Amino acid sequence: MANNRSSYNFSNVDEIKSRCNIVDVIGRVVTLKKAGSSYKGLCPFHNEKTPSFSVDEGRQSYKCFGCGEGGDVISFVQKYYNLDFMDAMEMLARDYGIELKKNSQGSRYTKEYYEINRQAAIFFFKAFRNGANPAYDYMRGRGISDETLHTFGIGYADEAWTSLTDHLVKQGYEPSKLVDVGLVSEKNGRYYDKFRGRVMFPIINTGGKIIGFGGRIISEGEPKYLNSRESSVFQKKNNLYGLNITKDYVKKEDRIILVEGYMDVISLYQAGVRNVSASLGTALTDNQARLIKRYTSNVILSYDADNAGQNAALRGLDILYGEELRAKVLVVTDGKDPDEFIKAQGRDAYLALADEAVSYGDFKLQKAAEKYDLADAEQKLLYIRDALGILRKMKPVEADMYLSRLSKETGISEQAIRQEFASTSGENRTGPPVFVPEHGSNSANWDTSDAEQQLLKLMLIDSDYTKLPDDIKDDVFTDRIGSSIYSAIGAIDKGERPLDMNVLQDSLDIDCTRMLDTIISKIIPGDREKEIYQDCINYIRRVKLKREDSEITARLRDPNLDQVEIEQLMQRQIEIQKKLKG
């Protein structure tokens, strides 16, 4: 194992520390008991009868006050298992399913990349604070105080094309490294600033290192928000915005409020709600949930009140529930986002909403019920089917409680509902369809269906799947998000795979990059790609036919139609129904 260790990319150290919870690792070999904000146990490195060994989950460190041993999760594994640093890394990576990548040019420059980001943050900060500029006016216009702006290190990227590039090059940094870290772009051998005319939000990990930036455009233009590209020092899936500042408040309150955007974090923090953080323009990830778990087991999702925000909350609940975190959803009234609400109503009103946040099961069932007319018998049965699907993913005791509630809500006997739940829970299906989308599937923030997402994932795998059948190619994607990603793939697709994901992401706005992250995370078995592709196409055809069928039904209600039009519409409807049955 050790022969190839020097070829590993140990910039993965940050990921190891992020994903390997020190309490879990040490808890395998030391009996730990909660003691205040830390855990105590008998030191494994010397004999003792009174526990003097302390593990701090928030700081991800251990310390023995008897023998003086201390360190982080990697140094513990080194010491306890008598391993060198690289063997300890490999052991933790293996146990936690982390891929240790081979050394690359980027990994050799990891320390330099952190320093480049730090210097860029200083440059942006000085531009923001020294002299009049539109970024400062914008943030003050949003009601953010100088103290809060300073706390979050807010900066300004001016409109010039090479301000930051020239500054960093003068400091001795190679332009190619500025491109690698995502601060600079290159075209035809010319280098220019990626962030221009934007308010700059430094993104800092819980270890205090500046790993990237988010930029909010000040004037008109797209994308509204622009993030640093993924690099050896910046992986969105492993980090949360503002947690470096708010983690101690999260521990103190023993709950975290997760919001969607930078401004939500900053506004809530300024208003006195300081146990707050946000994901980085992506759907919540397993790694982010594990990061939260270091500081608290209680999570309140406070996303925007629009459909996108509420669907994001639905997905976030599943991620948090899977990591055994207690998750609730705060629904901001009047359709406002958290930033708008707290400015209008204040801290106490917002915290009152937080205290009334809806639990995991209640929110999931509530959102499922909103899709149906429960006064209609057929619609009610469809809702029960969806509801039972939700309950099957819960722990048995929770599911049992909601089965009784479902009976009262629908007027169906509890015995019948329980029988249906038991029979469908124990199904042993053979040869299931490869792709079976949920009713009304809307698994991302928008109306891009599961089938469309699977189709886009296949296009990322093989250019052949970008060639869509003539009968549906003009209206495969039902919303702007899916259409934009499809167009962006076509614009850079030269038939070679893998596609350059950085180029693809840079061409998309923040909503599209969120959806792209969801699509990338989907797993498609390599031996079933063609089958899945055909299932997706068939499903999209059926959706298109059902849509046309509904439109014809609506038109047939028009009293002004003449007999010829009625007959033509009815004939077309018969054809559609035959195709659907087929």
Image (tube, helix red, strand yellow):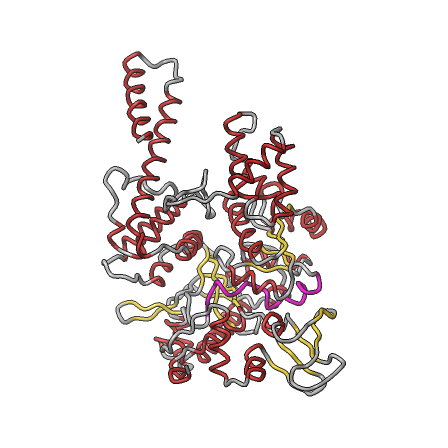
Our reading of the magenta stretch's main secondary structure is helix
Residue sticking out furthest to the right: 50
Up/down of 578 relative to 88, above or below: above
Q: Is residue 238 magenta?
A: yes
Up/down of 337 relative to 386, above or below: below
Q: Quadrant of the C terminus?
A: top left
How many numbered tags mark residues here?
Answer: 0
In this view, the residue in front, 155 or 408, is 408
Q: Position of residue 412 (x, y in %)?
A: 60, 29
Q: Position of residue 232 (x, y in %)?
A: 43, 72
Q: Position of residue 326 (x, y in %)?
A: 63, 54
Q: Is residue 514 magenta?
A: no
Q: Is residue 130 visible?
A: no
Up/down of 318 relative to 422, above or below: below
- 167 relative position to 69: left or right: left
Tell me the magenta residue range. 234-253
Q: Quadrant of the N terminus?
A: bottom left
Q: Residue at x 47, y 72 (%)?
A: 94
Q: Is residue 464 visible?
A: yes
Q: Position of residue 28 (x, y in %)?
A: 60, 72
Residue sticking out furthest to the top: 563
In this view, the residue in front, 369 or 196, is 369
Q: Quadrant of residue 78?
A: bottom right
Q: Residue at x 30, y 62 (%)?
A: 498
In this view, the residue in front, 513 or 535, is 535
